[in-house]
Image (cartoon, rainbow, N blue to C red):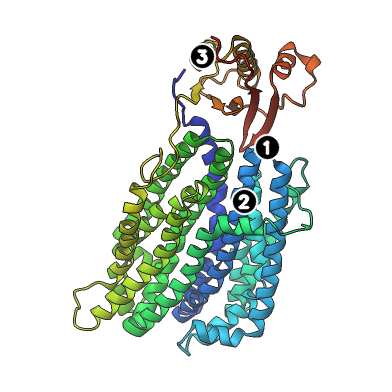
Amino acid sequence: MTSTRSSYLVGKAFRGFLLASVLTAAASQVGTLVDGIMLSHFINETAMSAINIASPVMQTLFAICILIGTGGSMLAGVAMGNHKREEASGLFSIVLSVIAGVGILIGVFGFMFLDSLVALLCPDPALQPYAAAYLRVIVPASPVYMVMAVTQMFVTLDGEPKRVTAAVAVCTLVNLCLDYAFIVWCDWGMTGAAFATVLSYVAALSVMSPHFLKKGSLSFMMPRSLRNLGKIAAMGLPFGIATMLIAVQLLGNNTVAIRYLGSDGIVTLSICMYLLQFSMIILTGTLESFQPVAAILKGSGDNRGVALVLGKAYSFLAVGLSALALILILFPGWIVSFFGIVEPGSVAMIHLALPAFAANIILQCVVYVLIPVYQIYGHKSLALVISLGQPLLPMVFFWLFSALSVSGREWLNPWWGFACGQMCVVLILLPFALTRKGEHMPFLLIPSENPEMMLDVSLHPSLEDQMEVLVEAEDWLKLRGVSHELRNKIVLACEESLGNVIRHALAGKRRSMIDMRIVKSGSGYSVLVRDEGAPFNPIEQDPGTGIGLLLMKKTCDDMNYEYLFGQNLLTMKWQSDASEGER
């Protein structure tokens, strides 16, 4: 037995979401990435740059999905952690309805004013025809992309990440095949690339939609009221602002590169933005794995669990970003060949830019992960510092460094402006995060657990460990002054629930773990038991099937069960009685 909380189960929950979440993030990036590579090889570099010019449109659509979808899914996760699945379905219904409506409006008005949009995005007349041909298909299809993006969030939250994995695999395969067919065989150029991307979104939706027909899954019902939309938007606001301002950053960076660094600069910036998409896949995949698990843990009051899963998130980021940064620093020639760049000036500038941009990528991702942590614990001003600073300050420093480099300061590498901007965000954030009042973990600001109010342990699925933890639980309850009668009820319920898991759900799985948490609250005590065994709902079981189940139900004042992220979560509650205080 381990006398402290193990990260085994929360880590497994995080990893259970990880593959699907990374692939979900890839789906939002892979369309333009694949289009850019195919157009660069089969048309020209100008066509590839036009995709980057059009990217603020996709980023804006993604920002709206993040604002509404992430806010809604985090609140739905908290509701599910509190055993309020109907409330979670209501939130899902509001999100899907709003996203579909907003997507239709964007598609209609964007198509009506397409020429003005292209002129705003692209000051270079040579690029405008390419960008217009691409956006003429992408913009009207906005609702398809947006519905797909938020559907992925909720299917993942609802415990079926493998379906999302399958949907994204289909999406990627369809996009690749149709890109080649439409660009090379049909000679449709930019229009063909756009159609391939849109049809890949439709394919992904067709794979995910059947999830909501399953019994017990989140269900859609036409919302009668949008009163929770404000809460949804408030929860997702920092994410939405950060993502929306990335669109502003893209537009500003494009303008700076064209004005100060010329055609070599815009090609280099395009390559950097494509490489940034790889880091966004890692970051967004990490966030979409962390957020549902953290929201559900927060909903059940498990702050220690939130800290443990955050550690797993940073471990994955460290590995993924280090690998990407090393590729950028050590293999710039391979990257140049991969994108088919042959102009000597562009090749030289790409070699200059990539090491600096690698530093920017690491700083951006490490800090951005703090936004959901600050949001769910109410530190919204700090979340806004990150969401505003990260897109804007790197753009400002890139502009400043670029202007200085062409005005006699040739030694100044303009591409280091991005990393300097990220460092400024950290320096602004640091004093506020370190001086916040209250009992919490430094900088992370996750509330510290009070051992006087909680017993939080993990044990191996063995009868020996069960006996040890029951003795520890009884001793802890005695020290809290719990009455003999209430103490016996709590220990008996713990014994039966742990015994069921050890003898049945995890029989023979010695390498697994069980988490047990006893919490003292103002109104009484609660026990949460978590395991990774097969789904088993003791509430729905016939008490006649075993005396143990009957005893559990008789001794508890309230009992709730959820099967979330592949794990059983059983919560039992007792009200304090008047005799408490007698030992």
- Closer to viewer: mark 2 or mark 1: 1
Few, some or many residues within 10 Å of mark 1 (<14, 14–19, 20+)? some
**In the structure shown, which secondary structural element does the residue marked by tag 2 occupy?**
helix
- Closer to viewer: mark 3 or mark 2: 2
Q: Which residue is mark 3?
A: 465
Query: Is the residue 20 above or below the residue 544 in the image?
Result: below
Residue type at mark 3: give it. Answer: Asp
Give coordinates of residue 337: x percent, y percent.
38, 68
Residue type at mark 2: give it. Answer: Ser
Give coordinates of residue 569: x percent, y percent.
63, 30
**In the structure shown, which secondary structural element does the residue marked by tag 1 occupy?**
loop
* Quarter in which the C terminus is drawn: top right
Earlier in the chain: of badge 2 and badge 1, it is 2
Earlier in the chain: of badge 3 and badge 2, it is 2
Q: Which residue is mark 2?
A: 73
Give coordinates of residue 164: x percent, y percent.
63, 50
Residue type at mark 1: give it. Answer: His
Occupied quadrant, residue 409? bottom left
Residue located 72% across and 48% down the image: 89
Few, some or many residues within 10 Å of mark 3 (<14, 14–19, 20+)? some
